[in-house]
Structure formats: C-alpha cells, structure tokens
Image (cartoon, rainbow, N blue to C red):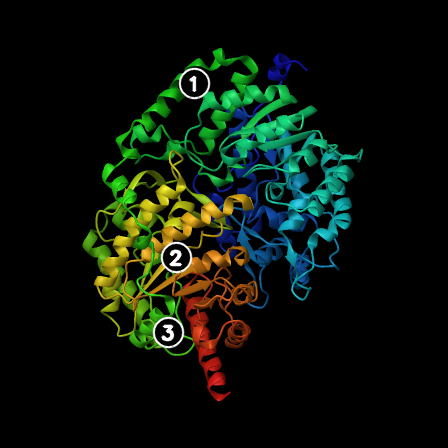
C-alpha cells in the first residue's frame, strides 16, 4: 500500500475510557448498593447509561471505533477472572448464589472470607485484583459481560472493539493460590487457558465483533525466553483459529523490546503500540524488524497517562514515519484514558492561561481525532488546531510559573552529606529506645483515621461559607480529641492525630506548596470506588509556611504518649500527582524533598519525636525495564534521605509502603535508612517479612496484620497468627504491630473493633514471648 493510501485509511480510536461518570455516578451507585439503598437493577441501569453516554460522546467527538468491555464495577482484571471461570474456591459458593454479590466479595471480602490480593497495575496508581491460580485450576468461558456490552454498543449503530486482558498478561499477573506451592508458575496453565480465550473470541465474533483487542502490557517488561516463547505459542494458537474476529494485540507503558519481533511475526491482524516517553523507542525497533507489512498499526502518540497538551506537530512527525511501516496506521492515546480525569473544561478555579496547557480524557480524545484527520486528509485540514497548539505549548514554556530561581539555586547547592543521618542506625536505635521507652512489639497505626460524614459536611460547609474558619477548626479539634482518646483507651503505643484536616495525603500538601495546582473535578480511579484527585505539578516547588506542625503539636498536647508527625514523601508526591514533563523527575523530586525537609525539621523543633514520611509509591514508580532501575532508585532514595537527613539521632523516622511487590526493591528499602518501615502484608500472609529477612534487613519493620481495604474485622487470633508468622522472619525487638495502611476509608465501628483486636493480639504474643 502506498503512503498516500495508508494515510487515507487512518482512523481514531482509544483503548479505554474513565468509568466513573462526570459526577462519579458509578461510585455513588455501587456504594449505595453495598449499603442497601440502591437495588441491583438500579445499579445495572446506572452502569448501562454511563457506558452509553461514554460511547456516544466518543463517537460524537470523531472516534471511529469505540472500546467495549473496559467498563467495570470494580476492576477489569477481576472481570477477566470471572470471564475465565477462575473463581477462587472460597468464593465459588457466593458467586453461584449471587453473581454480583460474589463479585464484590472477591474484591472486598466478607467477615468470614478474605478477598483477593490487591496490588498496583504496572507503574500506575491503579490497583488490580490479583488472580489466584494453581495446578488444579479449571478455566471455563463466560463471555456474558463482553457480549452484552458489545451488543449495547452495536445497538447504538457504533463500530465497536471489545477489549480483554490478554492471556499472557493475565497469567503473568497471577499468583499461586493459597495452599499452592510458592514456586508454582501460573504460565504453565497457558495450554489449558487458550481454548477458553478461543471460545470467548468465537462468542464475540458471533455477536458482531470485527476486531477484538487483547491487552498484553506485561510484554513491555523484561521477559525470559520461555515467557516470550509462550507469547509466540499463544498467538500462533489464537491467530490460527478460523472462528474468531481480527486480533489487535496491544501493549503500553513502555517499549516492547525483545517482545516486538515475537508479536510482529504472530498471525494476528494488528498491533497497538505506545510511542510516548520511553516507549518512543518502539519507533526505531519497529523499523528494525521490517515493520508490519499487511497489518494494522494503532499508534499511541497521545500520552494517556499525563494531563499536558500533546505536541501535535511532533506526533504528526511520528505518525508520518510510521506510515511506511504498516498496511494501515490508526491513531490512539498511548493507553486507556482510565488513568486521567474526565474533562479539563469542568475546572473553573484554574487560571485560563494554565487551563490551556491541560488535556484530560475528553481533550485527549479531541487530540487523537485531530491527529487522525491530519494524517488522513493532510495538515492543511487542521491548520487552526496546529496554530492553537503551538500557542499553548509556547505559553507554558515561557511562563514564570514553571521556574523559580531561588528554588533552583537551593536544589543545586545540595551536597551528599545533606542526604545522610548524622549517626549510623545502630547508634540511632539505642538513642531512640532510651528516649521513647516503647514496649516489645510496639503498636501504632499508619496515620489516617475514618473521615466521618460529619467531618465531610464540615469541610463542605467551609467551602460554601456556611461556617467560618474558626468553626471548622473547632470541628477538627474535636475529631483529633476523639482519635487520641480512642488510641489511649485502646492501648496503642505510638499515636497519630488522625489527619482529620486532610482531604487527601497528596492533595493536602500540594495545596500548601507553591508550584502545584489542585483540581475540583479531576477524579481518577485508584481502586474499586476509591477515587483520588491527583494535583498537578506545574512549576518549581517551595514551602511558604509549616503545613502540619500545628495539628501534630495540638494532638501531642492531649497525651503523654508519642504522637507521630505524618508527611507524604517526595516520590509519592510525584507519583500521585500529574508531574511536569519539562524537566527530569530527579530534579522535581529534589525540590519536593527540600520543601518537606523544612517541615520535618519544624516538627522536630516543636517536640515531635516520631516522624513518618510515607513512600507507598516507591515501588510502583519503579521503571518497567530493569535497565532503568538503578538510575531511578538512586534519585528516589536520595530524595527520601534528603527529606529526613537533618534530624537528631533520637528522632525516629518511619516510612510506609503498601499494595505493591516489594521483593525486588528490598535493597532500595534498606537504602532509605529509615528507622522503622511499615508495609502491607495481611493479604499476602507476611510475604514481605520473609523478603526482608532474606535480604538481611537490619532495621525495625511493621508488616501489616489488618487488611484495611476490606470491611471485615480480623479477630485477635487472626492478627496474632500473622504476628507469629512475622516473628519467624523478624526478631521481636525489631517487629512493630500495625494495620496495612491508613484507615481513612473505613468506618468507625470496624476500625474500633479491628484496632482493639490488633492491640489484644500484640499483648497475647508479648505474653507468649515473655513466657518462653
């Protein structure tokens, strides 16, 4: 096909779209269902209307092929587990009794049955539910959801493409089921799984699908020859079948590397590749393998993970190069738009000059359509759009918001000594034990306590002017008093103030640092019905005044027990924001670290003896390719040490991480040089404790014994059992007792019961140790 005819074939599409609705209608309907206020039929009706609205809006914007099957009540990987019949045995009866309730039980657990483990989706802040597989797993096809949603879109007279998690990625994301040997490799189930995928594909073809997209993001990671051979075998099998739709195999988040020639040779009709950021290397790699003759290429040239306007001219240049490498080139965002907010036009509080720099899902859709038009019909048809885009880019590049000479000078003056504590850990630990006088197996929480309805109402009343700042502060004081009193009565050893004043662990700080922008409607799904509003890191960072000292000091005035100061660390401030893309991440992290260092020093000066700097995003931000790890971990760990490096030896520095795979960053955890680390461990049955022990981790650690992402209350014996497991890996003098994560999303009744059981478990195990 000639270049001209290839351009004429260009179409616009996206891989997926935000699920929540403009006012988070899905979240409200699901939570209403859980509370018994919304019926199952009403929930399904809300979901169906949201899907139809999304598809119509995409089609009206000029998207030629809309995605189906990407919509989910909780998580698309869990949806795949259901479609494949891989229901854990402990949940099978509840799924058979009521499919919807059983689905939510797998996601959230019940009082008697633990949920599936949850962890991060590659290097994003989205969480997926980990499949549990074993040698006895039997897969059975259930294409009900996929077929129904495809038919909904076809009934609207739309061209639709179902989207599924591909078989290789599904198996590589899975873990051995409880009771299965830890060395079991789910990928060994591939030959058993492929006929089930083939059946689902056949069902979709029969329902009217011309194309089906199989997402294989796991192939952008480093893969062994055996894993690459499995991918080749999988697509030879699926591609060789006749009763199937055309197959589009999609990858995103990074470069495909050694997997690219495998997929290029596979008997499938199309590939979807990311060409943004580090994945831009796919361009040269694709040329090196001879392109995709006779195949469709969907080119992800609009970054689906950031919120900055696309450089349309640069993307058109990339697309022009790609025209000679495939039979047909279509245009898309680099990944599902699930990872960005819905509509920048809804933001009324951001200055118009800055708003023009931003592109959320709807704006990114428009960029994709513009690029497809320019590619198909020539740049002369998009002259106005290109001129406006150049002006937007120039406005951002020339804005004084993006540069502060004082901040840059301070960052440049940092020395290696600034990122080191004054004494080694052993000496610090002795000083801290003498100062804090904590018992064996000290108990604490991660930081936040439930955000009550009354507190949310007070916050809304303050914004609306129904109460003044003094009235709001009295409400905050009352919340802190309640939290401190409860912890003292329960017997917790190191207290927290509960973070009643904070709307979010990143947004709260972003609103108090220069260089950040906060959105009003920029909601992004983190997991299930949990949505966050990531702030936008637009310029250089500084701290005008203390951010947490007042409330931490107030809490300390209510008790003689130590109260932890609570801060969000520099890497997490970046990872859970939409970070600027016009300077290296390392420089931005250093700026944030210096601002937080001021806060740490002020907390210590105010009498705070324990300070926690949370870094739950350290692992999730780890690059997907091992070749990029060393550089990232060097600046990430330096940023943490820079934040905490200026305190006295007897000030105890904590950090916290949750819901990620920690085994491959244990050395980095060690390099943080925190005195105490608390980690998610309940759902994984203390796996991280074993990983720390295997590494020889020398400091104190608190692997969680209370899974806070489930409404169930762990019994005293359950928590004690996890503690005993932890003690097999971590000596008692270095083991802390705490939940997996903060308690903001939980209700007070379950929080009270769970923490009382946690403290009772610590006492039980202390008594066992003293009697042994």
Q: Residues within 10 Å of mark 3 (few under 14, many from 20)?
A: many
Are circles 3 and 2 on residues that touch, CB within 8 Å? no
Judged from the image, the secondary structure of the residue bearing numbered disc 1 is helix
Does residue 32 sit above or below 653 in this rendering?
A: above
Are circles 1 and 3 on residues that touch, CB within 8 Å? no
Farthest residue in the bottom direction?
771
Whether residue 475 appears in this view of the structure is: no
Q: Position of residue 2 (x, y in %)?
A: 65, 13
Question: Rounded to the nearest whole Å, what is the CA distance between mark 1 and mark 2?
Answer: 43 Å
Which residue position holds label 2?
Answer: 614
Disc nearer the start of the sequence (1/3): 1
Q: Residues within 10 Å of mark 1 (few under 14, many from 20)?
A: some
Camera-side residue: 521 or 239?
Answer: 239
Which residue position holds label 3?
Answer: 492
Are circles 1 and 2 on residues that touch, CB within 8 Å? no
Compared across the picture, whether 221 is left or right of 134 comes to left
Q: Position of residue 561 (x, y in %)?
A: 29, 74
Which residue position holds label 1?
Answer: 385
Q: Residues within 10 Å of mark 2 (few under 14, many from 20)?
A: many
Residue depth check, mark 1 versus mark 2: number of the one nearer the observer: 2
Whether residue 354 appears in this view of the structure is: yes
Does residue 475 sit above or below 346 in this rendering?
A: below
Q: Position of residue 507 (x, y in %)?
A: 34, 48
Question: Rounded to the nearest whole Å, what is the CA distance between mark 3 and mark 2?
Answer: 20 Å
Q: Residue sitting at 28 percent across and 34 percent down?
A: 403
Disc nearer the start of the sequence (1/2): 1
Judged from the image, the secondary structure of the residue bearing numbered disc 2 is strand
Q: Position of residue 36 (x, y in %)?
A: 51, 57
């Amino acid at each position: 096909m000639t270049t001209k005819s290839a351009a004429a074939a260009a179409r616009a599409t996206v891989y997926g779209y935000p699920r929540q609705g403009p006012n988070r209608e899905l979240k409200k309907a699901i939570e209403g269902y859980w509370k018994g206020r919304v019926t199952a039929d009403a929930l399904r009706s809300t979901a169906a209307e949201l899907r139809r609205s999304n598809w119509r809006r995409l089609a009206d914007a000029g998207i030629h092929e809309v995605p189906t099957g990407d919509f989910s009540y909780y998580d698309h990987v869990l949806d795949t587990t259901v479609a494949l019949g891989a229901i854990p045995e402990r949940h099978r009866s509840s799924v058979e009794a009521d499919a919807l309730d059983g689905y939510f039980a797998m996601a959230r657990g019940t009082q008697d049955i633990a949920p599936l483990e949850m962890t991060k989706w590659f290097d994003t802040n989205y969480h997926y539910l980990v499949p549990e597989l074993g040698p006895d797993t039997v897969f059975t096809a259930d294409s009900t959801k996929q077929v129904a949603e495809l038919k909904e879109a076809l009934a609207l007279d739309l061209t639709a493409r179902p989207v599924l998690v591909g078989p290789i990625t599904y198996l590589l994301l899975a873990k051995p089921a409880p009771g299965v040997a830890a060395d079991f490799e789910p990928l060994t189930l591939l030959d058993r799984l492929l006929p089930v995928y083939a059946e689902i594909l056949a069902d979709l073809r029969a329902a009217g699908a011309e194309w089906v997209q199989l997402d294989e993001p796991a192939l952008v990671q480093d893969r062994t020859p055996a894993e690459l051979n499995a991918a080749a075998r999988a697509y030879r099998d699926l591609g060789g079948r006749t009763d199937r739709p055309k197959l589009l195999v999609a990858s995103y988040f990074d470069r495909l590397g050694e997997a690219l020639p495998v997929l290029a040779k596979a008997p499938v009709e199309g590939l979807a590749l990311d060409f943004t950021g580090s994945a831009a290397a796919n361009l040269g790699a694709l040329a090196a393998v001879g392109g995709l003759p006779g195949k469709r290429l969907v080119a992800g040239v609009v970054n689906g993970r950031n919120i900055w306007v696309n450089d349309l001219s640069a993307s058109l240049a990339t697309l022009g190069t790609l025209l000679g490498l495939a039979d047909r080139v279509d245009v898309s965002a680099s990944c599902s738009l699930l990872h960005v907010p819905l509509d920048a036009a809804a933001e009324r509080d951001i200055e118009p000059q800055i708003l023009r720099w931003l592109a959320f899902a709807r704006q990114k859709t428009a960029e994709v359509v513009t690029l497809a038009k320019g590619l198909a019909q020539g740049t002369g048809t998009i002259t106005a759009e290109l001129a406006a885009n150049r002006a937007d880019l120039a406005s951002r590049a020339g804005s004084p918001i993006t540069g502060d000479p004082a901040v840059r000078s301070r960052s440049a003056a940092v020395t290696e000594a600034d990122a080191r504590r004054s004494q080694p850990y052993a000496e610090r630990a002795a000083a801290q034990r003498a100062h804090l006088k904590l018992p064996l197996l000290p108990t604490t929480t991660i930081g936040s306590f439930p955000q009550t309805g009354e507190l949310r109402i007070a916050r809304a009343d303050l914004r609306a002017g129904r109460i003044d700042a003094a009235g709001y502060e009295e409400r905050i004081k009352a919340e802190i008093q309640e939290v401190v009193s409860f912890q003292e009565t329960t017997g917790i050893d190191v207290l927290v103030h509960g973070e009643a004043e904070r709307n979010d662990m990143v947004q709260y700080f972003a609103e108090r640092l220069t260089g950040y922008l906060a959105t009003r409607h920029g909601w992004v799904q983190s997991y299930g019905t949990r949505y966050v509003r990531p702030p936008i890191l637009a310029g250089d960072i500084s701290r005008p005044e203390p951010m947490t000292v007042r409330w931490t000091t107030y809490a300390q005035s209510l008790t003689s027990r130590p109260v932890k100061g609570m801060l969000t660390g520099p890497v997490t401030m970046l990872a859970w924001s939409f970070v600027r893309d016009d300077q290296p991440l390392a420089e931005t992290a250093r700026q944030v670290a210096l601002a937080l260092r001021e806060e740490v020093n002020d907390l210590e000066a105010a009498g705070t003896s324990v300070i926690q700097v949370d870094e739950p995003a350290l692992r999730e931000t780890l690059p997907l390719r091992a070749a990029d790890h060393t550089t990232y971990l060097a600046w990430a760990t330096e940023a943490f040490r820079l934040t905490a490096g200026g305190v006295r030896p007897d000030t105890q520095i904590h950090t916290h991480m949750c819901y990620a795979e920690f085994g491959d960053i244990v050395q980095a955890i060690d390099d943080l040089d925190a005195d105490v680390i608390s980690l998610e461990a309940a759902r994984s049955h203390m796996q991280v404790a074993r990983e720390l022990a295997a590494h020889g981790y020398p400091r104190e650690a608190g692997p969680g014994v209370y899974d806070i992402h489930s409404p169930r209350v762990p019994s005293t014996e359950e928590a004690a059992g996890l503690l005993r497991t932890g003690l097999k890996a971590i000596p008692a003098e270095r083991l802390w007792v705490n939940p997996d994560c903060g308690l903001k999303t939980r209700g007070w009744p379950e929080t009270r019961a769970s923490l009382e059981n946690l403290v009772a478990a610590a006492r039980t195990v202390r008594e066992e140790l003293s009697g042994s």
